[in-house]
Image (tube, helix red, strand yellow):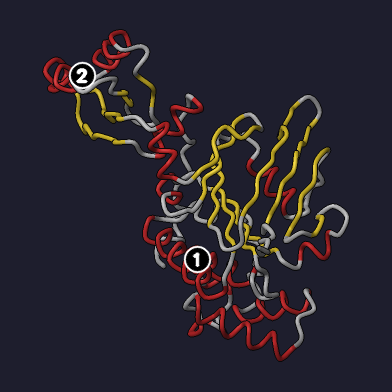
Amino acid sequence: MKTDVVVPAISLQGVSKRYGETQALDDISLDIAPGQMFALLGPNGAGKTTLLHIICTILEADKGKTLIFGVDAAKESARARRNLGVVFQQNSLDRRLTVIENLEFHGLVHGVPRRLRRQRIEELLEAVDLTARRNDLVETLSAGLARRLEIARALVHDAGILVMDEPTVGLDTESRQAIWHYIGDLRREFGLTVVTTTHYVEEVENCDTVCILDGGKIIALDDPQRLRAQYGSEYIRLVPNDASVEAALKAAYPELISPLPRGLMLRIPDPAFTKTFLAEYGDAVSELVFDRQSLESVFLALTGRHLGRPPAPNGKGGRR
């Protein structure tokens, strides 16, 4: 019986990249199915951005092959790029142009015919709720609105894959949530494959697949639920009342304690531990929170580190 073969949206086959003595990527192989929401997690220097740059044909791998819907990205980079819409960390909009002028210019650069370009722009403006701001200068937009415009711009040429490097970095919670709401709508409406990096573990929870990189290698690749079941542990997040309490905790539980940007994380080794710990230290700590098999705990278990703290909101991104 004949079955249809689904070509991966992205296929990486033994991809490696070195910068001098640093092995940025080491034999990376994975497939991303069409329509998937795919997240890359890893500490700084893990190779996430290098991998995205290879996917986007900005960099060429030293070894291995990158296929975009079956097209070799190294041999046919222009053809591969037609299926890629890219949103980088840094804002790349022309602030002197209006919203619609930025979209029009992108369509012209990519050779989108005028009639199709106008239709696509109208669809995207509506999809990211920017129709009413179409004639506003980009410099008048908040960071959250500008990011929505960048996402729309990346799709003007009808790309099938949306690639984003830290798309919500520097935005406040409300703006971050809005960005993911619109990304979800775009994905459903246009059948997009979405590939993203992020420092916010909660943004990964709704992804189909999570790839955890460390030292240029894949150390875990699965859906969030299975990763939590396999590697997740229960933790207590806490803030010691003073330095002496922190020192005592580190001395008492050297194998279980790890530092957080603010406070400590304590792994719970068995069901009876919590009761004993609270009886001894309950009054000596504050902001005690139980963390049950989160992706943060998965990341900690696999890398021995916490995800780096993202930059704080920049002040202009406060509102959607």
Q: Is residue 241 above or below residue 148?
A: above
x and y percentages locating residue 310 in the rendered image: 48, 43
Observer-nearest of 235 and 138:
235
x and y percentages locating residue 222 in the rendered image: 51, 43
Which residue occupies 40% across, 31% down? 261
x and y percentages locating residue 180 in the rendered image: 45, 62
Q: Is residue 194 above or below residue 204?
A: below
Judging from the image, what secondary structure is the residue with disc 2 in? Answer: helix
User: In the image, is 257 to the left or to the right of 170?
Assistant: left
Q: How crowded is mark 2: few (under 14 residues within 10 Å), some or many (20 or more)?
A: few
Which residue occupies 29% across, 36% down? 292
User: In the image, is 103 to the left or to the right of 221?
Assistant: right
Q: Which of marks 1 and 2 is nearer the N terminus?
A: 1
In the image, which disc is placed on residue 273?
2
Give the quadrant of the N terminus.
bottom right
In the current view of this chain or complex, which residue is farthest to the bottom? 115
Give the quadrant of the C terminus.
bottom left
Q: Residues within 10 Å of mark 1 (few under 14, many from 20)?
A: many
Which residue occupies 64% across, 63% down? 161
Judging from the image, what secondary structure is the residue with disc 1 in? Answer: helix
Mark 1 touching mark 2, by CB under 8 A?
no
Residue bearing mark 1: 183
Mark 1 or 2: in front is 2
Amino acid type at circle 1 is Ile
Question: For the residues marked 1 and 2, what is the alpha-carbon distance in whole angstroms?
Answer: 42 Å
Quarter holding residue 7: bottom right
Which residue occupies 51% across, 27% down? 303
Q: Is residue 317 above or below residue 94?
A: above
